[in-house]
């Protein structure tokens, strides 16, 4: 049968406790030496007995160098942990500040939109009204500025178009003087219209002439007599 599991607890018998300490100390020193040789590791072991007796083991790097390395490492780790803790605390504080600021801005936006006004006092409503009046004045000033700029731009474009029109008029006048010397037959080629178009044009001209004569006859006479009226009727 195998040996049963030993319960780890303080040995009450002083002699047995001392014997167990000596055996396990030797085994622990042996294990430390083995791991330093097998794994090429720097090992430092410090043991104090109940009577305060020191027992230590160190590899070839010596105890002082190993302890110095331990101090540097532990100090750097403590600083890093402290920095992480401060950083986490700082981020938490900033998050809380930003959250409260966002809530305040959202509340102010609702008030500007005319919402949730029941919780405001008279003084707060007056301050809100003053802020809205100031903002409205700024908006109107900016709007007027843009309108004036647009009007100025349109006036400038109008002036440029007028200058271009005057220039084109001058050019057209010069070209007209030259065209007067060209024979009319060469300048304006004859256009032959189809018969049906000529017929419609004659009917249109006749209707216009008749309408004009009728309007003339319906006008009251300021001067004249029946003979002039008869002459008009006979002509028509």
Image: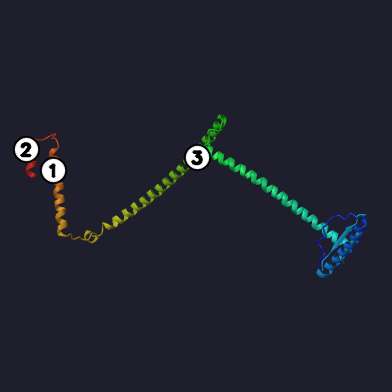
Q: Is residue 32 above or below residue 137?
A: below
Q: Nearer the viewer, mark 2 or mark 1?
A: 1
Please state if 100 lies on the left or on the right of 76 as rendered. Answer: left
**Label 2: few (<14), some or many (≥20) within 10 Å?**
few
Please state if 114 lies on the left or on the right of 155 as rendered. Answer: right
Q: Nearer the viewer, mark 2 or mark 3?
A: 3
Image location (x, y in percent) of residue 12: 89, 54
Please state if 73 lies on the left or on the right of 234 as rendered. Answer: right
- In the image, 92 versus 40, the foreground residue is 40
> In the picture, which quadrant includes the N terminus?
bottom right
How far is the residue under mark 1 from the one under mark 3? 64 Å
- In the image, 97 versus 161, the foreground residue is 97
Q: Residue furthest top?
A: 122
Secondary structure found at label 3 = helix
Secondary structure found at label 1 = helix
**Label 1: few (<14), some or many (≥20) within 10 Å?**
few
The structure residue drawn at horizontal position 70% and vertical position 50%, both measured from the top left corner, is: 87
Question: Could you say which quadrant of the image residue 39 lies in?
Answer: bottom right
Can the viewer see residue 123 in this picture?
A: yes
Question: Could you say which quadrant of the image residue 56 lies in?
Answer: bottom right
Secondary structure found at label 2 = helix
Q: Is residue 159 above or below residue 127?
A: below
Q: Which residue is mark 1?
A: 213
> In the picture, which quadrant includes the C terminus?
top left
Q: Which residue is mark 2?
A: 227
């Amino acid at each position: 049968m195998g040996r049963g599991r030993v319960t780890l607890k303080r040995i009450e018998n002083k002699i047995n406790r001392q014997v167990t300490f000596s055996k396990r100390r030797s085994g622990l020193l042996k294990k430390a030496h083995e791991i330093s040789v097998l794994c090429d590791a720097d090992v430092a072991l410090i043991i104090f007995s109940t009577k305060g007796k020191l027992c230590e083991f160190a590899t070839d790097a010596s105890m002082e160098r190993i302890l110095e390395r331990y101090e540097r490492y532990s100090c750097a780790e403590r600083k890093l942990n402290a920095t992480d803790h401060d950083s986490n605390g700082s981020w938490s504080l900033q998050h809380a500040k930003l959250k409260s600021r966002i809530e305040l801005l959202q509340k102010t936006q609702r008030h500007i939109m005319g919402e949730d006004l029941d919780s405001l006092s008279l003084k707060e409503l007056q301050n809100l009204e003053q802020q809205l009046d100031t903002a409205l004045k700024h908006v109107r000033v900016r709007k007027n500025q843009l309108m004036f700029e647009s009007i100025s731009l349109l006036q400038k474009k109008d002036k440029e178009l007028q200058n271009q029109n005057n220039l084109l008029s001058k050019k057209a006048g010069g070209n007209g003087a030259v065209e007067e010397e060209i024979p009319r037959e060469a300048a304006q080629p004859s256009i032959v219209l189809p018969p049906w178009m000529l017929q419609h044009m004659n009917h249109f001209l006749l209707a216009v002439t008749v309408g004009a004569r009728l309007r003339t006859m319906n006008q009251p006479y300021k001067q004249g007599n029946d003979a002039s009226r008869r002459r008009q009727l006979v002509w028509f």
